[in-house]
């Protein structure tokens, strides 16, 4: 997992809890998480946004985003284990696919208690 701040972790966890209780401000059981906001600062994502022809910046930014995905994956996995729920990320059942899926903007995380296997 990336080293994210305690505030960032608590924010993500609270967004997941709000979704768990169908009280998330974004969409009830859906939380909106901006993964790029908790990247370790490297500047590659910003560099690529300013110069999309920079192939080296793109490669480095994608590596950073994959590390951010790993952090999100670890948080979601722990939340799922702790709260016994099903989680969907961008309408797909949460799984290891997330580790390889580069996302440049945000994730929609649905937390579903009804479908959970207890």
Image (cartoon, grey):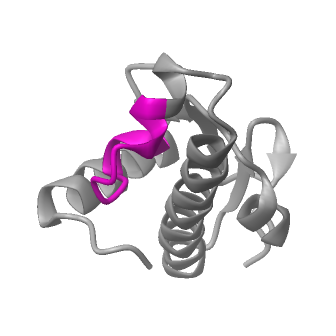
Q: Is residue 109 visible?
A: yes
- The structure residue drawn at horizontal position 60% and vertical position 75%, both measured from the top left corner, is 77
The quarter in which the C terminus is drawn is bottom right
- Specify whether 46 is left or right of 72: left
Given residues 37 and 87, the one toward you in this image is 37
Q: Is residue 74 magenta?
A: no
Start-end of magenta stretch: 35-47
Which residue is depicted at the point 44% across and 44% down?
A: 44
Residue 52 placement (x, y as % from top left)? 63, 22
**Position of residue 83 in the picture relative to residue 86 (left or right):** left
Q: How many marks?
A: 0
Q: Is residue 34 visible?
A: no
The percent coordinates of residue 104 (x first, y second) are 61, 33
Task: Please indicate whether residue 45 sits to the left or right of residue 29 in the image.
Answer: left
Depth check, front residue: 47 or 67: 47
Which x, y percent locates residue 112? 68, 48
Q: Is residue 42 above or below residue 107?
A: below
């Amino acid at each position: 997992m990336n080293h994210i701040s305690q505030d960032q972790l608590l924010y993500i966890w609270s967004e997941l809890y709000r979704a768990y209780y169908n009280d998330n401000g974004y969409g009830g059981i859906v939380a909106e998480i901006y993964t790029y906001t908790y990247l370790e600062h490297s500047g590659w994502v910003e560099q690529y946004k300013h110069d999309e022809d920079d192939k080296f910046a793109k490669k480095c930014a994608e590596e950073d985003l994959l590390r951010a995905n790993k952090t999100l994956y670890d948080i979601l996995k722990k939340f799922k284990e702790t709260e016994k729920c099903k989680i969907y990320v961008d309408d797909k059942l949460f799984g290891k696919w997330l580790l390889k899926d580069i996302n440049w903007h945000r994730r929609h995380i649905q937390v579903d208690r009804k479908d959970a296997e207890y």
